[in-house]
Image: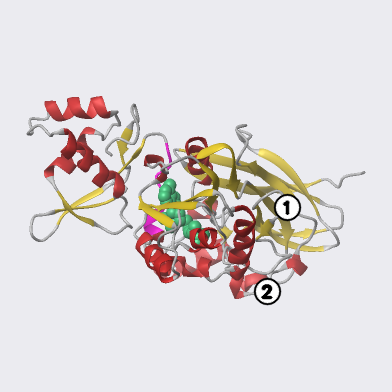
Amino acid sequence: MGFPWPGARLRTTPGLVLQLDGFGGWLARHSVSTTAVPGLRLDHLRALQALGGGGDEAALVAALAADGGPPLDEDTLDEVIDTVLGHGLLGVEGHAHGVAGGFALASAQLPMVADAVRVAAYGAAITAHAPGKRVAELGCGTGILSATAARAGAAQVWACDEADVIETARSLIADNGLADKVQLVQGRSFALMPPAPVDLLIHELFGTDPLEESVLDIIRDVRDRWLAPGGRLLPRGFTVWAAAYGGAGFDAVEPLPARLTAALAPLGLHPGPLLGAADHPVRRPEGGLRAPPAAALRGPPVAVLEVDLHDDAPLPAGARRHLLRLDGDGPVEAILVWFDIALDEVRRLSTGPAGPPTHWGWQVHDLPAVINGHDGDLLELEVEVCTEDGLEAVRLRALRRAAPDPS
Ligand SMILES: C[S@@+](CC[C@H](N)C(=O)[O-])C[C@H]1O[C@@H](n2cnc3c(N)ncnc32)[C@H](O)[C@@H]1O
């Protein structure tokens, strides 16, 4: 296959690590924390070097002609590009470089597969929409959602995942007697196309911060290239919620600045500049570990971000302000953040404290200091969606307690 489409610009993955093994062979990792890819040849390294600053196929061919190495025929060049793309050592310029390393092993995916709330909600939506449809799944992981689509009577299912976990998907799908109904391809979505446009595109690329797996960049790209006209994204969007939280001694931890000071004191160090960075710390207690803290919400939640993945409108740029109204008197320790997934027009999957806990848990943005809140007080939140270099995040900070609203 080689370059995924004419004119595509590829770029060597930022953070690429090259090493020599004990026998003089080259190893590569697409970031320091990922598994090494052995057996790289000189022509792979030449291509990575040629595409270090990014380039299209013509630029690569020109760079290889100029680097003094032997010429590569078209088949070898295609194989070289397929290999380095397939291992995540190369990416499509301007798009997210993923977090695949964390999902390479099936064991890393078990908490989400064992999350009955998530699996049941996705299962119901897929069973409703897949029958008779051409289906694609982006990032199939262990294969459970593609298997569900096949079992529900999809006309065909094509699924991809960049990580080695796809081998687990292959076994799971075969063990369930669905191997002839699901086609699996290992690779990064930006460089892949299903055999034909699809009617239904399934994905689950949500982190505890729902943006942290680069869902916006990845889904908008495949939506435009893989979906047939009128095709459906499942899920079609999501909403991020925030609420004032406090009172229950939740997690029973000291505020972060105090913990930093205590941890460094035995070393004779003062945390100094780290205390500034600790002003807006985020904790991620796992949902499955404790009852959801709905009772400790100190006021109604506010939607701080709504995303319709079918919609092309850019997300609001810059920081936006929201007001959280406090109900009753008492301390406010933190801002609790969670999200709801719109699986379709009617089915929603919530990770919030009002529902059963999910493997996502929620985010707890500790306030720099506990606030002694009064009924009707307003807490001002600043929320910014960051999408720089394909790295996405919802940044949030509670600014201050505003004057009570006279209305
Ligand atoms: C949160 S897991 C979900 C797995 C599976 N869909 C499920 O719901 O159980 C996301 C998966 O997407 C894969 N992935 C992330 N970005 C990708 C991309 N751009 N192309 C292909 N796979 C990707 C990861 O390797 C991971 O296995």
The local secondary structure at tag 2 comes to: loop
Residues 174 and 114: in front is 174
Is residue 31 shown in magenta?
no
Report the colour scheme: secondary structure
Looking at the rendered structure, which numbered label has been put on residue 346?
1
Quadrant of the rendering where the N terminus is positioned: top left
Residue type highlighted by circle 1: Val
Quadrant of the rendering where the C terminus is positioned: top right
Please name which of the two marks, 2 or 1, marks the residue nearer to the observer.
1
Residue 39 found in image quarter: bottom left
Residues 289 and 255: in front is 289
Looking at the rendered structure, which numbered label has been put on residue 123?
none
Ligand 1 closer than 8 Å to the CB at disc 2? no
Q: Is residue 272 visible?
A: no
Q: How many marks?
A: 2
Q: Which region shows up in magenta?
A: 95-102
Tell whether label 1 touches label 2 (CB within 8 Å): no
Is residue 98 shown in magenta?
yes
The local secondary structure at tag 1 comes to: loop
Distance between the alpha carbons at the discs numbered 2 and 1: 26 Å
Magenta: main secondary structure: loop
Circle 2: is it few (<14), some (14-19), or many (20+) Cα within 10 Å? few
Residue 225, image x, y percentages:
47, 36
Rendered view: 322 above or below 118:
above
Residues 17 and 260: in front is 17
Residue 116, image x, y percentages:
60, 70
- Please report the residue visible at 44 percent of the width from the left and 60 percent of the height from the top: 141
**Residue tagged 2:** 291
- Please report the residue visible at 7 percent of the width from the left and 30 percent of the height from the top: 68
Circle 1: is it few (<14), some (14-19), or many (20+) Cα within 10 Å? few
Residue type highlighted by circle 2: Ala
